[in-house]
Amino acid sequence: MSVEDLQSDGDDAAALRTARERLESARAAVEDHGEERLQAVATAYREATDLLERYEERATGTGDFAAFVEFQEQFVELVDGLDDDLPARNAFEEANDILDQRRLSESDFDRARDALDPAADLVSLLDDREAAVERYEAAKRDARRRLQELDERIETLERLQRLGEADLDAPVERLREPIEAYNEAVEESWTTFKGEASAREVFRVVDASEAYPLAAFRPPPSALREYVESKPAGEEPIPTLLEYADYSDSKRSHYVDDPTALRTRVATHRTYLERLDAEPLIVSWPPPEAGTLRHRAAELVSVVARFAPDSVVSRARTLRTLPDRVDYGRLRETALARDELMADERDRLERGAVEEELTAARDERERLQAALEDIG
């Protein structure tokens, strides 16, 4: 987003103030005439226009004489029942005078409607106020949504600016090498463990990992867990179970005591078993913040120790102390910058475009926040 885009979006504060001013003006117009008096006009106007609508076809020309009489009586009754000081009462009287004839035409009804225009104008003050309230509420929602967008934009630009200040020549291999060494070792160990240990043993490690949220595997489906725990086939490695699942029932019966159970419990959950890899134990690159790495590595040690050799556990312990042995924050910023900064972003940073966008975003946010605070 360019500075011009930010400026074009910067009308929210002005729109909010304009909506507030229009609402205040609409409320003042209603107050000038009195809420109750205008509501009385609105009620009378609705009744009058309803009568005109309902009787126009029947009470005009040589139509229904009974309807004609009934219509005139009801209109007279409506007008006579109005308060003497009701705003626009004259409009209702004028309409009544137009309709007080021995014979009515459609043009008479049109003239009566025109005569009621002053009352319609007063009723519109209530409608205008309602519309102003809706516009004002919409403007507030837009302003708050825009404020959130600006907060996110500012955070992104500040992070981009921070990455731009990173030393791209810093020796990130001091972070990469121990992390990659651990990742490769734990992945190899898990692959070996999953391929050689019984499915029951693997599931016990998976279950134990639930106590360590930063190093937890996805738990197995309950039906699959129950099968592995209760059936002799659970002593077989996972690759063997998957191989059995591909056999026909007759062939499978030579290897397991309940071939149907293996098909319904294992074959239907093949995707889970195949995807049960070391991903929950892998440390990302670029690496997480120092505190996160310390806490996660401590949990990794606890989980990895349940299936991997001491050498792999030692590598996990190395990660736990890594932030204390190197200039972790600076090297991590370099890793992030190398990984995330695209060529166009580096160009924008060098040209000062990022700084301009950040200044524009901050200024707009300040104006918008002030406008929201002004309206309370």
Image (cartoon, grey):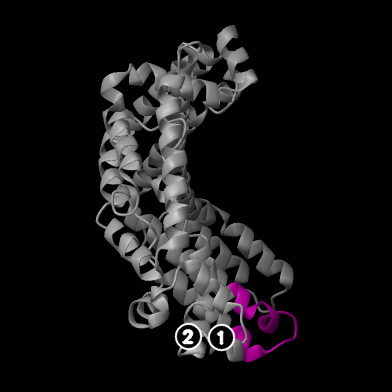
Residue at left 52%, top 67%?
239
Q: Looking at the picture, tell me which residue is in the foreground, 256 or 100.
A: 256
Identify residue type, mark 2.
Val
x then y, percent, for residue 181? 44, 33
Kindly state the secondary structure of the residue where label 1 is placed: helix
Residue at left 41%, top 45%?
186
Q: CA distance from mark 2 to mark 1?
A: 6 Å
Q: Quadrant of residue 114?
A: bottom right
Q: Which residues are magenta?
A: 52-70
Q: Is residue 308 above or below residue 174?
A: below
Residue at left 30%, top 31%?
318
Q: Which residue lies most toward the right here?
A: 62
Residue at left 44%, top 37%?
284
Q: Is residue 37 above or below residue 181?
A: below
> On the image, numbered disc 2 is attached to which residue?
256
Q: Which residue lies most toward the top here?
A: 351
Q: Quadrant of the N terminus?
A: top right
Q: Main structural element of the magenta stretch: helix, strand or loop?
A: helix
Q: Is residue 87 above or below residue 148?
A: below
> On the image, numbered disc 1 is attached to which residue?
252
- Is 354 included in the stretch rendered in magenta? no
